[in-house]
Image (tube, grey):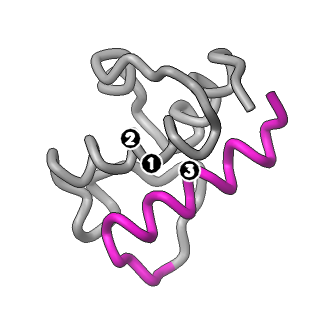
Amino acid sequence: MNRDRVAASVLESIRKETSFTGDISENDNADSIDGWDSIAHIRIMYRIDFSLNVEIDLLETYSCETIGDLIDLIQTKGGE
């Protein structure tokens, strides 16, 4: 799966589910994004799941320390 497409989907999902308007980098994490709480996390993963047609194990996502780690994880799932 194309990394740029995954990154775009992840960033769009974060913005829509948290209403965060600041800059987001792959080095950021949930703690650095206002509004990214446990409920937002589930909604972000669902939105990514749907937009990329992938099945993401929510428990796996908790091991991701950064948004870049999350993008790498999702990229291994195939989809699109």
Between 27 and 60, the one nearer to me in the picture: 60
Q: Where is residue 71 in the image (x, y as percent from the top left)?
A: 61, 36
Q: Position of residue 42 (x, y in %)?
A: 26, 41
Q: What kind of element bears circle 1?
A: helix
Q: Position of residue 2 (x, y in %)?
A: 84, 35
Q: What stretch is highlighted in magenta?
A: 1-22
Q: Name the residue under label 3.
A: 10
Give the number of the disc on residue 3: none
Q: Residue at x 28, y 17 (%)?
A: 59
Please identify the quadrant where the C terminus is shown: top right
Q: Does the magenta stretch include residue 19?
A: yes
Q: Name the residue under label 1.
A: 47
State the residue lying farthest toward the left: 38
Mark 2 neighbour density, 10 Å: few (under 14) some (14–19) many (20 or more): some
Q: Which amino acid does label 2 sit on?
A: Tyr
Choose the circle earlier in sequence order: 1 or 3: 3
**Can you tell which quarter of the image residue 15 is in?**
bottom left
Q: What residue type is labelled 3?
A: Val
Whether label 2 touches label 3, CB < 8 Å: no
Whether label 2 touches label 1, CB < 8 Å: yes
Left or right, 74 with reference to 38? right
Kindly report the distance in space between the C-alpha atoms of the residues bearing marks 2 and 3: 11 Å
State the residue lying farthest toward the bottom: 21
Dot in front, 2 or 3: 2
Reply above or below: 80 against 15.
above
Q: Name the residue under label 2.
A: 46
